[in-house]
Amino acid sequence: MSRRAVLGIAFALVAIAAAWVLFVGLPRWYSARRAASVDAAASAALPQPAASAVRKITATLYYVTEDGMSLTPAQREVPFAAAVTDQARAIVEAQLAPAVPLVSAIPPDTKLREVFVTERGDAFVDLSGEVASKHPGGSLDEIFTVYTIVNALTVNLPAIKRVQILVDGKEVDTLAGHVDLRHPLAKSLDWVIHDTH
Amino acid sequence: MKPLVAAFAAALCLLTVALPAQQSAALPYTVVTRDAKRPLAARTINGQEMFALDDLARLFNLSVREDAAAASLTISAGGQTVLLSTQQPLASVGGRMTSLPAAPAREGRTWYVPVDFVSRVLAAISATKIDLRKPSRLLLVGDVRMPRVAVRVEGLGAQSRVTLDVAPPTGHAVSQEPGRVVVRFEADALDAPDLRANTTTDLVTGVHLGDTAQSVAIDVTPRLGSFRATDQPGPAGATRIVIDLLPQTEAAPQTPTPQQPQQPARPQAPDTPPLLDLPPAGGLRTIVIDPGHGGDDSGARGTQGTLEKTVTLAVARRLKATIEARLGTRVLLTHDGDQTVGLDQRAAVANNNKADLFISLHASASVRPAVAGAQVFYLGLEGYGEAAQRAVQAPRDALPVLGGGTREIEIIPWEMAQARYIDQSAAFARAVEAALRDRVPMSPRALQQAPLRVLVGVNMPAVLVELGFLTNAQQEQQLLADDHQSVLAQALVDGIMRYRAGAGGTR
């Protein structure tokens, strides 16, 4: 009887250890390896916070290509968050941050106000008024601005299917008179050049 | 005394300021009944021609009651009642909603309604026939026979040909009198505001309204021998009267001059516009051009400070003139001044005028100054998901009709109207892109699909053209230059002609 109990406890301990390795240890080790392998240019462009204890994930963010004709993906470290909404917030924050020498399609000084994610997988990204008031105009650049946000969320977070951009807490027709923002938009890689990684 | 005058002046100033910003008197319309003609004042308020509701009330014996709480006007005529919203461009006629190009406007104690209120609302409830003819600024009341007449004069060698298009077809007789040939119509009057000969020939010196209001006189020289008049079916149900005038000759007058082949139609006029504003078979009747941005919304800004709204309006006006000259098609601009116009309102101008094509003109901007070249966009539906699918397969619904029975209607959400025209818009975009490519530098992304807001509600083939990039210094100069604007207008007309010819449908 007691041998059985000992066996049971040992089995339970092994199971717990295995679970820890599988769900905590491995991902940590893996993400540390990924972080180490990020190319030099990227780490130079985005200064890493000193605190190495903060968990990171690698996210794909979008910037305007040299020729101004497409978006190009770039791998970036962003803080890890357990909840989808928090993770979405972290990704958008990273996308809004200046990333010299890369050029973002999102007007400078645009701030993230809030992110909401519905059960259906629609994310609502509430940006500050600068995204519209400081937008240079032009259909193509407006498309780039919109799909930078839409793709940054839908590509990195499979739970998010569609994205709608709000400005200063309100639904808007467009940012600068071109792209229809009255509905959530699905991912579109038409505007993205192929990943060279 | 002085303070009083000052106060009065101040009050006057205040009043002027309080009035709606853009309003001006427009040319009056003429009301024609069987026995009288009288003017009806019209004025332009916020870009819309309007009639004073009081004038219409007197004319049609309407009673008007305002319900401020419900923000509506109740208008009754002979037992029929119309509810007109004072805030939205909508009227309810016997329970059925009718859209108007603009909401009523108030000026002092007077309400003004768009001229289309007469044709869309009053005509529906009036016992007498009401016919609003905007091009000739006529309002026909009752059973007035007033056909529209347009004329063309051509020289065919020694002969001359006078062509009259008459709509609707009307009985007529052609006779020769000293010094002229007269066409008399069985009508009360003729609707021919700009009836005149476009050319003079050896035989014809002029065309004008005859001695009576029902006739057209063709002034001829003494060299005229005889004439032959034939009726042909004209475009869109009109009658075409072709009068061949033959010179006096020693030879038998019935044999046509041998050296001149008697081929009918237009050897020396390659782009003769249609005589009447009627749809030529399979052709384009109305084209709406939308100058992008305007008013508070300047659009993109060039490196030298050029505003997108300035460029789009200039090119739109030029394009309108070019289309009218080359195609003879009616062209409307969504706004012909520096006005703020909503994106839905732009689509509404095209939809309410039943346009055949919609072209929105823009000038682009990029974060990269080197980016240049023109682009043509049409609507992409990928962002719209199921809503677009539903719109494409427009469900048919049977609605009960007052007095029994049902009527089948198609329900298309206003905002998805364009979903059914994607293929045609794609063909139109290809045609415009190809035509532009022949004449101006193109972007590497020259032909694109995107969820563009201004196109979604347009109920006809529609494209958005980015004429060039204002953020590129060289292109900014080009877009401001007269000659480049003309080249763009010519290229866009080429695109329209290619699409019309069906060349745009194939690659």
Image: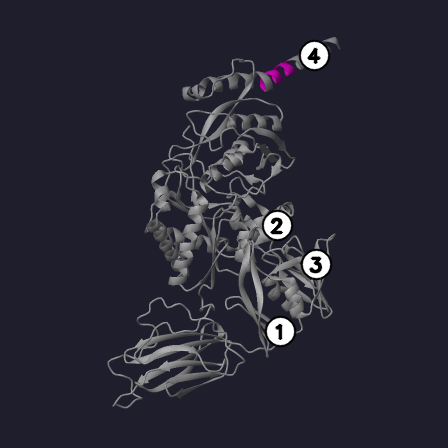
3D distance between C-alphas at marks 4 and 3: 84 Å
Residue B128: image quadrant is: bottom right
Quick one: SS at disc 4?
helix
Q: Nearer the viewer, residue B439 or A109?
A: A109
Which chain letter goes with mark 1?
B
Q: Are marks 3 and 2 on the same chain?
A: yes
Q: Which residues are magenta?
A: A14-22
- Amino acid type of the residue tagged 4 in the rendering: Ile
**How dense is the environment of label 4, judged by Cα within 10 Å: few (below 14), some, or many (20 and up)?**
few
- Name the residue tied to disc 1: B129
Looking at the image, which residue is at 48% across and 20% down? Answer: A34
- Amino acid type of the residue tagged 1 in the rendering: Lys
**Which of the labelled discs sits on residue A9, or is there none?**
4
**Residue B115 image position (x, y, % from top left):** 58, 63
Disc 4 versus disc 3: nearer the observer: 3
Quick one: SS at disc 3?
strand
**The stretch drawn in magenta includes residue A18:** yes
Which chain letter goes with mark 3?
B
**Residue A134 image position (x, y, % from top left):** 50, 34
3D distance between C-alphas at marks 1 and 3: 23 Å
Q: Are marks 2 and 4 on the same chain?
A: no
Q: Are marks 4 and 1 on the same chain?
A: no
3D distance between C-alphas at marks 4 and 1: 97 Å
- Amino acid type of the residue tagged 3 in the rendering: Leu
Looking at the image, which residue is at 42% across and 81% down? Answer: B217
